[in-house]
Amino acid sequence: MRAQALVLKSRLLGGGGTASGVLGGIGSIHNVCHSLCVTVVSILAIFGITTSILPLMFLQTYQMYFWIGALVFTALSFYFYLKQKRLVTRDRNLLLINGGLLLFGLPFLQLADYMDFFRFIGGSLALFGLILLSKLNIQSLLFVIVIGGFLTNQYFMYRMGIFDKMGTQPGSTAASAMKPLSQMKLTPFDVVLAKERMDKNNDGVCDVCGMSIDQCISSGQIDCNMGNNPQAIGVLGSQHIHADFKVYVNGRALTFAKPDYYMKSSFMHVDASQNTEDASSVLHMHAKKVPLWLFFRSLGMNLSKESLTLADGQVLKNENGKQLKFYLNGQKVDELGDYSFQPLDKLLISYGPENDSDLQKQINSVTNFAKDHQK
């Protein structure tokens, strides 16, 4: 009887360890799948392939609960494993797999800068456990090592920007939710605008992808790049270009070389410079598809097709013989507020008489400093 009881206890402990290991794997697989999906989408974007990962993104809100559940079940599995009189190899392998998955799917934003390390260690543990569990032969093992090595090499080439140097531009339509593309951070203005554009109901969750709005912001997004919006402002750091510009009001050029105007938005801004004409005349854009209105709004102004509102609240409209005019590279255009400038563009916004005799002088006055900033 006692021997039968010991056998039963051993089976219960072994079964409990296996069950906890399986449940732990199910709990942690959500975070792993999310990390893998975002990484795959980002890498596909390098080759110009745009895709969406929306269908299950709402689960990202509960990622911490999934991970904690996985940790609890894995801890139980480890307890059952240690309590067995005769350690079961299968349960040990499950522990290796689950421990690796837990490391790979860490949901803590504070560790974002170190996620490559944790994913490498976690992935290696999980792969090693899977190899032991499957009892792969030497040919299969070599195949896994070769394919794994190739994919790892490609991933690190992407991280180090080698594809950029080869002339391939990485896409910005899907950014890693864990690590931003740029060391720059969103300014207070950017954060307010991001919440306004991505969290309209103010519930702390992105309206597009279902992730925490703070996580979207920490990854450098002011518009959610996980959706299918071709007009979405790109991820911060997705490009860095410059343009020259001038704004005239009744024949007087506005000065933007002011401390209160520098770096109000990380997406588009003017920079301090010893040459005040340079500082006042060069726009810096640090993402793709940033409209010009964003720059003016960051300064407390407002630019639209019909009007220009200055920082002091003065509204300049098309009235009383005065007109707001827009010029792009010397050619008149209908508006510039929604325009996202191209490298070395020359932009002019002029408010004054409809037939302003000084208009050509204003066009010619647009500087040529942007080329000195363009790399």
Image (cartoon, rainbow, N blue to C red):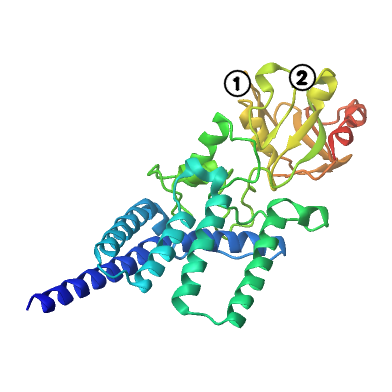
Q: Earlier in the sequence, mark 2 or mark 1?
A: 2
Amino acid type assigned to the residue bearing label 1 in the image: Gly
Residue plotted at (24% across, 62% down): 83
Q: Quadrant of the N terminus?
A: bottom left
Q: Position of residue 262 (x, y in %)?
A: 69, 23
Circles 2 and 1, Cβ within 8 Å, touching? The answer is no
| Image height of 71 relative to 241, above or below | below
Q: CA distance from mark 2 to mark 1?
A: 16 Å
Dot 1: what SS?
Answer: loop
Residue 98, quarter of picture: bottom left
Provide the secondary structure element on which disc 2 rests: loop
Residue 224 visible at all = no
Which residue shows up at 81% across the image and 37% down it? 243
In which quadrant of the rendered image does the C terminus lie? top right
Residue 122, position in %: x, y? Answer: 50, 58
Q: Amino acid at mark 2?
A: Thr
Mark 1, residue position: 313
Residue 255 tag number: 2
Kindly identify the residue that appears in the image at 58 percent across and 59 percent down: 39
Residue 184 visible? The answer is: yes
Q: Nearer the viewer, residue 366 or 67?
A: 67
Residue depicted at 37% across the width and 44% down the height: 203
Count residues near mark 1 (Cα–Cα under 10 Å), then give few for <14, some for 14-19, many for 20+: few
Nearest the eye: 23 or 375: 23
Residue 369: which quarter of the image? top right
Image coordinates of residue 44 in percent, x first then y, are 66, 64
Q: Residues within 10 Å of mark 2 (few under 14, many from 20)?
A: some
Image-based side of 325 in relation to 25, left or right: right
Circle number at residue 193 = none
